Image (spheres, helix red, strand yellow):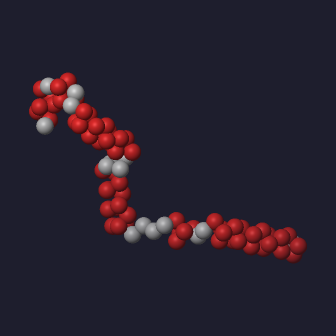
Amino acid sequence: WQLVSSTFPLAFLSNPLVYFFLRICLFLEATGVASGAWVLAAIHKHVAGFQRDEVYIGTADEQEADDSEDHEEEELWLVVE
């Protein structure tokens, strides 16, 4: 097909079915779904054992609770000093 399309590009693209499939392929490529980087990232995630951010830094609610505890401790130190 590549040989035919490169030899006769206008005749090849004038076919409505071919043009339709070409537009679908270009759309999928523009979304990045077929990008090789996704495959490499998935392999790297598996090899390195990466986990979601919540495992390392906690959820937003947990971080907020930690921040409020830190502020309470700071206030206690200010009173003692």
Whether residue 61 is situated above or below residue 40 in the rendered picture? below
Q: As drawn, is 58 to the left or to the right of 66?
A: left
Whether residue 33 is situated above or below residue 67 in the rendered picture? above
Q: Please provide percent x and percent y for residue 65.
A: 70, 71
Please indicate, yes or no, whether residue 38 appears anywhere in the rendered image.
yes
Residue 64: image quadrant is: bottom right
Question: In what quadrant of the picture does the N terminus appear?
Answer: top left
Q: As drawn, is 73 to the left or to the right of 23?
A: right
Q: As drawn, is 67 to the left or to the right of 30?
A: right
Question: In what quadrant of the picture does the C terminus appear?
Answer: bottom right
Residue occupying image coordinates x 83% and y 74%: 76
Residue occupying image coordinates x 45% and y 68%: 51
Whether residue 16 is situated above or below residue 30 in the rendered picture? above
Q: Please provide percent x and percent y for residue 24.
A: 31, 41
Q: How many marks?
A: 0
Q: Please provide percent x and percent y for residue 78.
A: 85, 70
Please, which residue is most extreme toward the front here?
A: 16
Residue occupying image coordinates x 31% and y 49%: 34
Please indicate, yes or no, whether residue 70 appears anywhere in the rendered image.
no
Residue 8: image quadrant is: top left
Q: Please provide percent x and percent y for residue 7.
A: 12, 26
